Image (cartoon, helix red, strand yellow):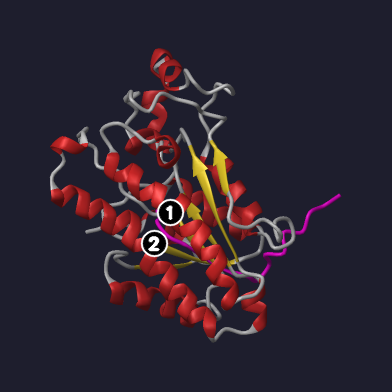
Amino acid sequence: MSLDFGLKGVHVLVTGAAGGIGLETVHTFRQLGARVTAHYNSRIGELANSTDIVALQADVRDEKSVDKLLSNAAEKNGGPVSVLVVNHGIWPEDNKHIVDMDLEQWSNTMAVDLTGPFLLCRAYLRVLKSADDSTKDAATIIFIGSTAGKFGEANHGDYSAAKSALMYGLTPTLKNEIVAIAPRGRVNSVNPGWVSTPLAQNALKDTAFVERALATTPLQKVAKPEDVARQVAVLASPTLSGHVNGMNVMVDGVSYFDSSTDLGLDDEVVGRNGVHRSSPA
């Protein structure tokens, strides 16, 4: 039996799409026949060589830049966005307890990881209001959350707080609000644990390092970007997930770690947050 995801010709916008999970998500939707707009901030990466993907730059912290992103996506890629995948994010490398964290770091993390998603969702919904029925029928917002949003993460309270707000604040709120614009609209969150990216190869050669990172993961393996991207596609599908709404789907191998301990894996290397980190500047 072959599965029809119902995504052929559907316009999908993926933020933070220059690499890692974002780029894999772009490729997955293209394989399913979707029209894909790929957002990037400061580096375009291999998107520059794509002939079947519309790549657009925007600073997610800036209101006008985000509004322009949604309008340009509609203009350059055949109409308004139906599926919004909020994948971008930053994770400050310095380990800092809340007591030692300066306001500048907190404010910048919130601007990128929380205010950015707010601006994107608002712009998306405003455009969706005047869209045709076919666009509204496929309307879906999918956040990329994190295990840190569920369990917390010592030394990274800013990141944990922002991801938790997406998962447990915006997801259930927007799933109630989107239906006022698109009666079949849905909002869900996909929340990864450890994810292997190309930058992770050297770290993953250290067996002891990986064993420590996976000490509380029953599946005992590091996820691949496609593991997350495929779950995003399943949730985006009105055929496969048309009655799945307001859910937080953990894609973490069932990870139950002690949030008081920093396991030491740099998210830039292994992608604990499940997104491709990008500088907002």
27 or 14, which is in the foreground?
A: 14
Question: Which of marks 2 and 1 precedes in the sequence?
Answer: 2
151 or 2, which is in the foreground?
A: 151
Q: Position of residue 4 (x, y in %)?
A: 77, 59
Q: Secondary structure at mark 2?
A: helix
The residue at which mark 1 appears reads as 166
For the C terminus, which image quadrant?
bottom left
Relative to 191, does residue 257 appear above or below in the rendering? Answer: above
Q: Residues within 10 Å of mark 2 (few under 14, many from 20)?
A: many
The residue at which mark 2 appears reads as 117
Q: Residues within 10 Å of mark 1 (few under 14, many from 20)?
A: many
Q: Is residue 133 magenta?
A: no
Q: Position of residue 214 (x, y in %)?
A: 47, 21
Assess whether mark 2 and mark 1 are in contact (beta carbons under 8 angstroms).
yes
Q: Residue furthest right?
A: 1
Give the side of residue 9 with respect to residue 76, left or right: right
Predominant secondary structure, magenta span: loop
Three-letter code for the amino acid on which mark 1 is drawn: Leu
Q: Position of residue 274 (x, y in %)?
A: 45, 42
The residue drawn where x is 61% and y is 47% is: 231
How far apart in space, not on screen, are marks 1 and 2 (Cα)?
8 Å
Magenta residues span: 1-18
The residue drawn where x is 20% and y is 38% is: 98
Q: Is residue 16 visible?
A: yes
Q: Nearer the viewer, mark 1 or mark 2?
A: 1
